[in-house]
Image (cartoon, rainbow, N blue to C red):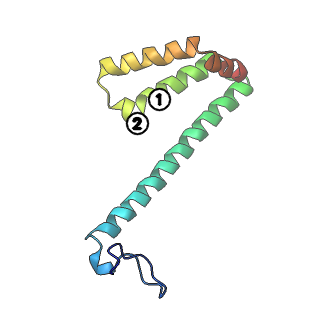
Amino acid sequence: MSDPVNRKGAAGTSAVAPESAPEGAGDAFRGAVEGAKASGSEAASRADAIKALSTEVQAGRMDAATAVDQLVQRVLSEGAAASLPPEHRARLEEVLRSQLAHDPALLALQKNLG
């Protein structure tokens, strides 16, 4: 009986023969890896920005409300939010600010920031 899945056998044969791999599969994989690297560096950049704001608050050069406002503005100006139509971005800002004003966990984080 043949093995239609081409599992790795005792001789160590490859699961997929190179000639049967879809054309461009290597390019797609490399593109996905590069995208993940870029995403990781963007996340590091965001973390650095948050740390910088926290440092400013701890040093007394900025109050917590100003730091939170800057974070909200950053969220609205980057990523998917930046491409929203103005009326949707305004609604998103309204929801974010409402959550910041009423969510107990977010209020506690803001209190700890200051």
Report x, y in % for residue 79: 40, 36
Q: Residues within 10 Å of mark 1 (few under 14, many from 20)?
A: some
| Tally of marks | 2
Residue that label 1 marks:
75
Q: Which quadrant holds residue 5?
A: bottom left
Image position of 9 (left or right of 102): left
Above or below, comparing residue 62 to residue 2 in the picture = above
Report x, y in % for residue 19: 28, 80
Q: Which quadrant holds residue 113?
A: top right
The residue positioned farthest toward the front in the image shown: 1
Q: Residues within 10 Å of mark 2 (few under 14, many from 20)?
A: few
- Asked if the residue under mark 1 is in contact with the one under mark 2, i.e. CB atoms within 8 Å, the reply is yes
Q: Which quadrant holds residue 112?
A: top right
Instruction: Say which quadrant the N terminus sits in.
Output: bottom left
Report x, y in % for residue 14: 41, 80
Q: Amino acid at mark 2?
A: Gly
Above or below, comparing residue 87 to residue 16 in the picture = above
Seen from the viewer's position, the closer of residues 61 and 47 is 47
Instruction: Say which quadrant the C terminus sits in.
Output: top right
Residue that label 2 marks:
79
Q: Check disc 1 and report its element: helix, strand or loop.
A: helix
The residue positioned farthest toward the left in the image shown: 23
Residue 63 visible in the picture: no
Above or below, comparing residue 6 to residue 52 in the picture = below
Image position of 84 (left or right of 71): left
Q: Check disc 2 and report its element: helix, strand or loop.
A: helix
Image position of 10 (left or right of 4): right
Seen from the viewer's position, the closer of residues 34 and 57 is 34
Report x, y in % for residue 9: 45, 82
Marks 2/1: CA–CA distance: 8 Å
Please give the label number shown on residue 5: none
